[in-house]
Image (tube, rainbow, N blue to C red):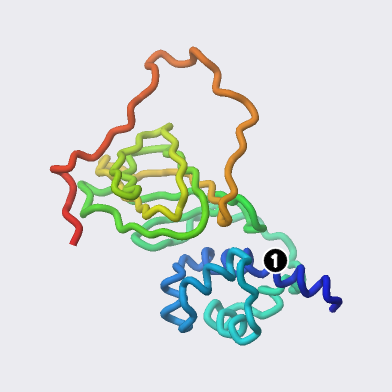
Amino acid sequence: MAGGDVARTLAAMGPRLRGVRERRGVTLADVSRATGISPSTLSRMETGRRKPTLEVVLRLAKEYGVALDELAGTAPVPAPEPRSTVPRGFGDDKAVLPLTRYVGGLHAHKHVLPAVEKPSGRPRQVSHEGYEWLCVLYGRLWLALGDQDLVLAAGEVVEFDTRVLHGVANAGSDGPVEYLIMFGPQGERLRPRTRPSAGRGAGGRRTTERVPAAERTPRL
C-alpha cells in the first residue's frame, strides 16, 4: 500500500470507529472501561486528531467484534440487503430505527420512547463530540439540555452542540414519544437553502414549554 493510501486509510478510520461504536449503542466511557483506553484518546481518534496504533486498533476490533479490514475500509462490500423496518432495542427501553447507512457525515435515526404515566426523574445526561438536530413527531419529549429543562411537542425542533450535557425522557404524555435525530459526529450541520415562508399557520409561534422547577426530581 502506497504512503498516500496509508494516510487516507488512517484518516478514514476515525469515522469508522465512531460508526461501529454507535451502532453498538455504547459510549466512550463504556469502551474505555472495557479496553483501558482513555475516553479522551478514543475521542481524538474518532475525530481524526490522533492516529490509532495497531495495538489500539486490535483491542478495539476485539471489543467491537469486527475484523480489522472492516475498520480499515478494505473489507469486501456486501450485497445490499432489504432495509428492515423493525426498530432495534436500545438502552433505557428506547427503540431506534436507523434511516441511513453510516458513511460519514450526517446520519439519521428515528427514536421511540415507550409510554409512561409520569417521568421517573430528570433524564440521565451525556456529552460527546458532534452536533444534533432533533424533531418531535408524536407525544411530548423532556429534553434536559445543560441546566435547561424543555418539554417539546409534536412539530417542535431543537438543535444543539452535543458537547453540552443532554438527555431525553418521555414527559408523561400517556403514550409513546417518537422523534427524529440528524446527527453530525464531527460537528456537521444542516444547511438551509431557503428561508421559512411568512404568514403560514393560524396560531403564531408557540413558546416551548419548560419543566417547572418544583416538578423536577432532584438529582442525586
Residue occupying the point 46% across, 60% down: 128
Above or below, comparing residue 17 to residue 132 in the picture = below
- Compared to residue 47, the image places residue 154 above or below, namely above
Please name the residue shown 33% across and 32% down the image.
208
Q: Measured along the vertical axis of the image, is residue 16 above or below residue 52?
A: above
Pick the quarter of the image with the N terminus.
bottom right
Packing grade of label 1 (10 A; few <14, some 14-19, many >=20) is some
Percent position of residue 129, x then y: 50, 58
Position of the C terminus, as image quadrant, is: bottom left
Q: Secondary structure at mark 1?
A: helix
Q: Which x, y percent locates residue 95?
A: 43, 56
Q: Residue furthest right?
A: 2
- Which residue is found at the position 45% from the left and 77% from the top? 32
Residue tagged 1 = 12
**Which is more toward the observer, 85 or 19?**
19
Residue 99 shows up from this direction: no
Q: Which amino acid, by three-letter code, is at mark 1?
A: Ala
Q: Is 117 positioned to the left or the right of 168 in the image?
A: left
Q: Total label count?
A: 1
